[in-house]
Image: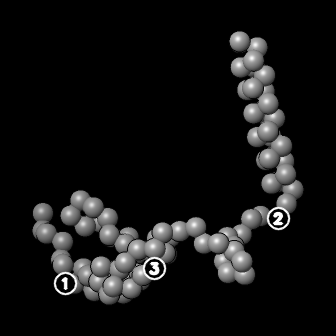
Amino acid sequence: MLRLIAILLLAYAAYRLARRWVRGRSAPRQVRRGAGGRIDDVMLKDPQCGAYFARRDGVPLKHEGGELLFCSPECRARFLAANPPPEP
Ligand SMILES: [Zn+2]
């Protein structure tokens, strides 16, 4: 049983090495957008303007212990103006 585990570990390590080798030889991977590429991201709604945007494009703001995400720094600033953080 121990030998089987050792063989599996070795095979996994070899697999990881091979993958790193293949990746190192190819050009750096770019995030593919459009042209058949799929965008793997979550769409979020801006609490200020109601627009939808991808989570990775969001502008974060710490608010009341949580984190809000906005579509743009402008919306973040507008939200902050309307909801000023409580003074400590
Ligand atoms: Zn917005």
State the separation of the CA atoms marked 2 and 1.
46 Å
Q: Is residue 57 left or right of residue 10?
A: left
Give the residue type at disc 3. Phe
Residue 41 vertical placement versus 33 (above, below):
above
Q: Which mark is residue 8?
A: none
**Lower sequence index among marks 1 and 3:** 3
Question: Furthest residue to the left?
Answer: 87
Residue at image position (42%, 81%) is 52
Pointer 2 with pointer 3, Cβ within 8 A: no
Q: Is mark 2 within 8 Å of ligand 1?
A: no
Other-residue count near label 3 (Cα within 10 Å), few / some / many at <14 / 14–19 / ≥20: some
Secondary structure found at label 2: loop
Which residue in the structure is indicated by mark 2?
27
Secondary structure found at label 1: helix
Q: Is residue 23 left or right of residue 42?
A: right
Residue at image position (37%, 72%) is 69
State the separation of the CA atoms marked 1 and 3.
21 Å
Q: Is mark 1 within 8 Å of ligand 1?
A: no
**Lower sequence index among marks 2 and 3:** 2
Which residue in the structure is indicated by mark 1?
82
State the separation of the CA atoms marked 2 and 3.
29 Å
